[in-house]
Image: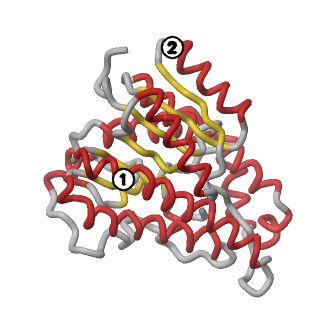
Amino acid sequence: MAGKLAGQTVLVTGAGRGFGKAIALGLAAEGAAVTVTARSKDQLDATVAEVEGSGGRALAVTGDVTNREDVARVVAAAEKKFGPLTILVNNAGVTGPFGPVWVVDPDEWWAAQAVILRGTLLFMNAVMPGMVERHKGRVINVASLGGQWFTPYLSCYGVAKAGQIRLSEHATAEAKEHGVHVFAIEPGTVITDMAENTMASPDAQRWVPKMVQHLKSLKATGDPAKGLARCAEMCVELSSGCYDALAGRFLLPKDDFDKLLLEPPPKAGSATVPREPPRTH
């Protein structure tokens, strides 16, 4: 399949549904060979079927992003099928638990950190050595504005996403001289299965009712397809190599990447400075 990503090999985590699925479909549509991973085989198989139905190439490999052996197995399967990975998209995530730090279950809180932050680190640790050796590669970490703005009763999500953004900055500084570029993006607010789970959560309804109401309003009036398409478009643009100068930046759906290229780069460590008003998520 011809396209701006022809010849690229991609791995997308959390790609059985929502943003991950949209990203995988978008990258495949531009010619990339895509490996998708998550825990649900049925959902992954559906993603692969859509890619192949459009003439693309895809592979489904189930795995737990928090398990180091699973991560190694997924990466090995992807590279055996399509060759060395050139693009990694860390999208797997969860919301919750919700509530004050003295109320949430510490084990549940820590397990969520493992999915969002440990999973991101494990895949970067597994994939980036090959990228560094080949002096070529891009990593896109799907973070969130929740990692920039302090929101009470969302400590788990906020801490994990803030960690993702900062990890992306560190990796950018460390890998840039090796030709590897790392980005963090805000995917946007879209009603996905994760959002549905949040709206249905009694803890979310109790502790973050404004966020729940915001999601319900969005569900009633918003168009999920538009938001998913923009997120996929961002990943295609960053994967193309045209915007490597923006590595280390926290990028938003509203950003015009061409205009950002003309702006002075932010000072080291400043990429986490918020650039728009707080939002309920």
Say above or below: 48 vs 171. above
Q: Are marks 2 and 1 in contact (CB under 8 Å)?
A: no
Which numbered dot is residue 162?
A: none
Horizontal arrangement in the rendering, residue 26 relative to residue 128 (left or right): right
Q: Amino acid at mark 1?
A: Met
- State which tag comes first along the sequence, 2 or 1: 2
Specify the quadrant of the image occupied by residue 237. top left
Say above or below: 111 vs 63. below
Please name whichever residue, 69 or 186, is drawn nearer the observer in this view of the structure. 69
**Residue at (36%, 60%) from the top-left corner?**
250
What x and y, as percent, mark residue 162?
Answer: 49, 70
Mark 2 surroundings: few (<14), some (14-19) or many (≥20) residues within 10 A: few
Say above or below: 39 vs 152. above
Horizontal arrangement in the rendering, residue 105 relative to residue 50 (left or right): right
Look at discs 2 and 1 and give the one toward the viewer.
1
Q: Secondary structure at mark 1?
A: helix
What x and y, as percent, mark residue 15?
Answer: 59, 39
Measure the alpha-carbon separation of dots 2 and 1.
Answer: 30 Å
Residue that protrudes farthest toward the bottom in the picture: 102
Horizontal arrangement in the rendering, residue 148 relative to residue 8 (left or right): right
Q: Secondary structure at mark 2?
A: loop
Which numbered dot is residue 54?
A: 2
Specify the quadrant of the image occupied by residue 106. bottom right
In the rendered image, which quarter contains the C terminus? bottom right
Which numbered dot is residue 128?
A: 1
**Residue at (25%, 66%) from the top-left corner?**
173
**Residue at (56%, 69%) from the top-left corner?**
160
In the rendered image, which quarter contains the N terminus? top left
Please name whichever residue, 193 or 247, is drawn nearer the observer in this view of the structure. 247
Q: Amino acid at mark 2?
A: Ser
**Residue at (86%, 64%) from the top-left corner?**
202
